[in-house]
Amino acid sequence: MLFDTPEKGYCIHALNAIFLSSKNKWIRIDARGNKRGIDAQFSINEEKLAFKANEDKDEKDYPMIYVNPHPKTLSTLKNHTDAVEMYKHHLPAYL
């Protein structure tokens, strides 16, 4: 993690989502993978993400699902070739 305090900044972590036509339901999933202490799982009935937003640090969880990538996200990715520079200084503050 590059930033570990609110003063150093935040980043937007994009979750993945799948649509289950048999359930007529979108399900958010976390593709970051598991490791010791992290247990993200696929579940139809409950969300099991790697991390929950830390409201004490003013982190937000935006529950909306974009069927197509948000234009701000695409623009940021297309206009930067240095991932660390992009992460530190050019990610959108909100969608």
Image (cartoon, rainbow, N blue to C red):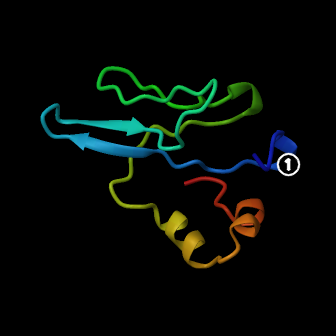
| The furthest residue to the left | 22
**Left or right of 30: which side holds 68?**
left
Amino acid at dot 1: Lys
> How far across and down, in percent of the image, does residue 73 sit?
53, 64
Which residue is more in the foreground, 34 or 88? 34
Quarter of the image where one finds residue 90: bottom right
Quarter of the image where one finds residue 5: top right
| The furthest residue to the right | 7
Quarter holding the C terminus is bottom right
- In this picture, is 60 found above or below 77? above
Quarter holding the N terminus is top right
**Left or right of 59: which side holds 63?**
left
Give the SS element for disc 1. Answer: helix
- In this picture, is 54 found above or below 3? above
Look at 64% across and 60% down and name the residue there. 92
Judging by the rendered image, the residue that carries numbered circle 1 is 8
Look at 46% across and 26% down and name the residue there. 48
> How far across and down, in percent of the image, does residue 24 sit?
17, 35
| The furthest residue to the top | 45
- In this picture, is 7 found above or below 78? above
Look at 68% across and 27% down and name the residue there. 55
> How far across and down, in percent of the image, does residue 16 sit?
42, 46
**Left or right of 84: which side holds 33?**
left
- In this picture, is 8 found above or below 80? above
Quarter of the image where one finds residue 21: top left
Look at 55% across and 77% down and name the residue there. 78
Which residue is more in the foreground, 69 or 44? 44
Q: Residues within 10 Å of mark 1 (few under 14, many from 20)?
A: few
